[in-house]
Amino acid sequence: MRLYISIDMEGIWGLTSWREPKERISELMTQELNLVLSFIEKYAKNADIVIADSHGQGDNLLVSKLPENVSLIRGFPRNYYMMEGLDESFDGVLFIGYHAPVGILPGQMDHSYSSSTFYEVSINGKKVGEAEINGMLAAYYGVPVILISGDDVLVNFSKLFFPDTQFVITKKAISRHSAQMVPYKSLVEQYNRAIKTALDSIKRIKPLELRPPFTIELEVNDTGAAYLISQIPGAVLVSGRKVSYSSSSFLEIYKFLMVSAYIGWVNKNL
């Protein structure tokens, strides 16, 4: 069995702010990942596992504390950032420590790829977050998302898109930078049940259904970012802060989103 794990920070148990010390972020992300890996090993021995460190600059996980039999993708930039290295050879994808889309109250540290750039992201008229966007990229390769973990706001939002996927609630959001953690014992029990169920039913879980053509709309935080993003060939400036892009290939949609995020970062630093 071949599994792909994309791990973010905002939905990790014990964390509530981007201002947490880097050492604590690394420690808790690594701790939760190792918990996940222990249950995968329990229920799918000798699985081939690729992990994408997918928060910030992709340099969060403590590599010395990871099992020797996993492959880690880290660093930045990458063509496909949170999903770098994914292809048709994988049997399933797990999203660990994910969060609600930008603008969903009271989601923990809510954003969609770039908190400094995007005010809202929609695809074919539906508001989406990182779980949905990355799930669609996985579907492009025919790979199902078998488990998603994060705060309760993420879970409530994403369940509508992923009806067959197992979910783990790590904390209950109070505000953007405040949450009530579930008891750690509950976290362990949830992961145990969810991973067992996900692996037992992996062949019955279907990838998200993709219906081309696709149109992605980016509502950005200021007109400067919109203007710069609209210079991408094929992009359309819809309004002062909104840009759209259409393609029959979701891979191109994903690339457009990534380049737009990078451009937004440049705009912020002008």
Image: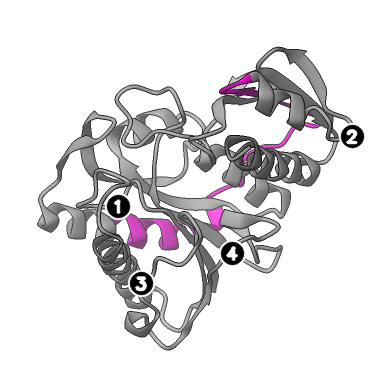
Q: Which residue is mark 2?
A: 233
State the separation of the CA atoms marked 2 and 1.
37 Å
The image quadrant that residue 23 belongs to is: bottom left
State the mark number for residue 37: 3
Foreground tag (2 vs 3): 2
Q: Position of residue 124 (x, y in %)?
A: 70, 22
Amino acid carrying mark 1 in the image = Ile
State the separation of the CA atoms marked 4 and 1.
24 Å
Question: Earlier along the polypeptide chain: callout 1 or callout 3?
Answer: 1
Amino acid carrying mark 3 in the image = Leu
State the separation of the CA atoms marked 1 and 3.
15 Å
Question: Earlier along the polypeptide chain: callout 2 or callout 1?
Answer: 1
Q: Give yes or no for contact between labels 2 and 1 (Cβ–Cβ under 8 Å).
A: no
Q: Residue lying farthest right?
A: 233
Q: Which residue is mark 4?
A: 91
Residue placed at 53% from the left, 69% from the top?
Answer: 74
Q: Which residue is mark 1?
A: 12
Amino acid carrying mark 4 in the image = Asp
Foreground tag (4 vs 1): 1
Span highlighted in magenta in the image: 193-222
Residue placed at 69% from the left, 12% from the top?
Answer: 240
Residue 203 part of the magenta segment = yes
